[in-house]
Image (tube, grey):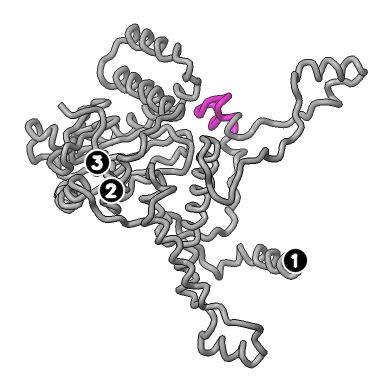
Amino acid sequence: MPGTHSLLSPSSAHRWLLCTAAPHYESQFPSTTSKFAAEGTLAHSFCELNVRKAFCGMSTRKFNSEIKKLQADPLYNPDMLTSAAFYIEYLTTKANTYSSTPYISPEERVDLSEWIPGGFGTCDCIMIGNDVLHITDYKNGVGEVVSAVDNPQMRLYALGALKKYELIYGDTIKHVSMAIVQPRVTEDVSEDSMTTADLLAWGETVKPIAKEASDGPGAFNPGAKQCRFCRGREVCAARAASMLDLEKYMTRQPEGRLTQEQAAEALITGSGIISDAEVGNILKRGEQLVTWYNDLKSYALQALLDGRAIPGYKVVEGVSRRQWGDIDKVVDALHAAGYEDAAIYNRELKTLTGIEKLLGKKQFNEILSTLVVKPAGKPTLAEESDKREALNPAVNDFADLAETLNAKTSND
């Protein structure tokens, strides 16, 4: 029976598939946990109970009893029930797309050793019907939206599920679909699908990479995606070398001031300036450089707080702003001085999200759906890999915005 942790976990596949040195490199750093991880585990438990109640025949009495136990946890908050309800709503909708009632099972442990040495994982929910295997993953995080498209974690889960149910379904499963439900961030469920043949072919490409990463030492390949959650990202020499490579562009700067003729010549020949292609490359690399710099700052601060020395730096007290001590006493003092509530309180409507939580999604839509507007977002620079559709620069809707930005630039 595998242990609690696998060297190559499905959740870190986006890292070791790109940087095969990551697993053994990270192993020298302590594994950390957090309150957020514990909250995520608890939220998953609410989701599992709701699946067992909705699809697996759990009695209402048993369900209520187990729910009360979870609610007694100090980390419980009502949002967990709301998120679980959203999760069940999605699964119900998905189940209704099958021509007959599908097989549904939550929290299924799957063996991935055929593709990953010693690998295993847990599928939040497996759904099988007709010729389709559907894998749903619940994420409790409130950070960025996680896409199911080309997601290696989801594909590995799907491979494990195919293997687990092979004896029952044989080769009757022809298609695989995968979904990520992240209700605390978005109501849009991210989905992806592929044929079973394509998934198995992808699995074959994983095998040699996984073996290299498992055997070690592997090859370092720094990058934004693979470095982001690496335990040793702050002090990785390969990452540092990659970031400091940007210094080569410093040699492109002309010395001294350019005359008008020299500047015109530079624009014609490209001498002394970077090309548009280089601008794109530096933007991508520069974003990683900022992230790396902030990681180093965080590491250095903790090192100094731990009593170690970082040459050239020290810890000082940051800027502090005034704040109220005991709010109730402040209000009592103001009342005693003759000030009414209308003078000391600001009255404002709760946020749209706050009102939606107050009413619940169904009642919110019934009462307020026609009163909600979503204006066009401000044009934002993004990498080509971003899932959002590119804007047409010629669209007239943004003409006024361009004029505003140009006017502001001129004034500045």
Q: Whole-percent x and y of residue 198?
A: 17, 52
Q: Quadrant of residue 135?
A: top left
> Compared with residue 327, is residue 239 higher up or lower down, i.e. above or below?
below
Residue nearest the viewer, comparing 138 with 76: 76
In what element is the residue under mark 1?
loop
Locate the N terminus by quadrant. top left
Magenta stretch prevailing secondary structure: helix
What is the count of numbered marks? 3
Question: What residue is pinned by disc 1?
Answer: 412
Residue type (three-letter) at the residue carrying disc 2 = Trp
Residue type (three-letter) at the residue carrying disc 3 = Leu
Say if mark 1 contacts mark 2, CB within 8 Å. no
Q: Whole-percent x and y of residue 54?
A: 32, 20
Q: Which residues are magenta?
A: 355-368
Residues under labels 3 and 2: Cα distance? 7 Å
Residues under labels 1 and 2: Cα distance? 46 Å
Question: What residue is drawn where x is 30% and y is 10%?
Answer: 59
Q: Whole-percent x and y of residue 230?
A: 37, 45
Say if mark 1 contacts mark 3, CB within 8 Å. no
Q: Which mark is residue 16?
A: 2
Residue nearest the viewer, comparing 223 with 398: 223
Residues under labels 1 and 3: Cα distance? 52 Å
123 left or right, relative to 356:
left
How would you rate the neighbour count of disc 3 (Cα within 10 Å): few for under 14, some for 14-19, many for 20 or more?
many
Which numbered disc, 3 or 2, marks the residue that appears first in the sequence? 3
Question: What residue is pinned by disc 3?
Answer: 8
In what element is the residue under mark 3?
loop
Residue type (three-letter) at the residue carrying disc 1 = Asp
Question: What residue is drawn where x is 55% and y is 70%?
Answer: 394
Residue nearest the viewer, comparing 313 with 128: 313
Q: Give the label, 1 or 2, closer to the camera.
A: 2
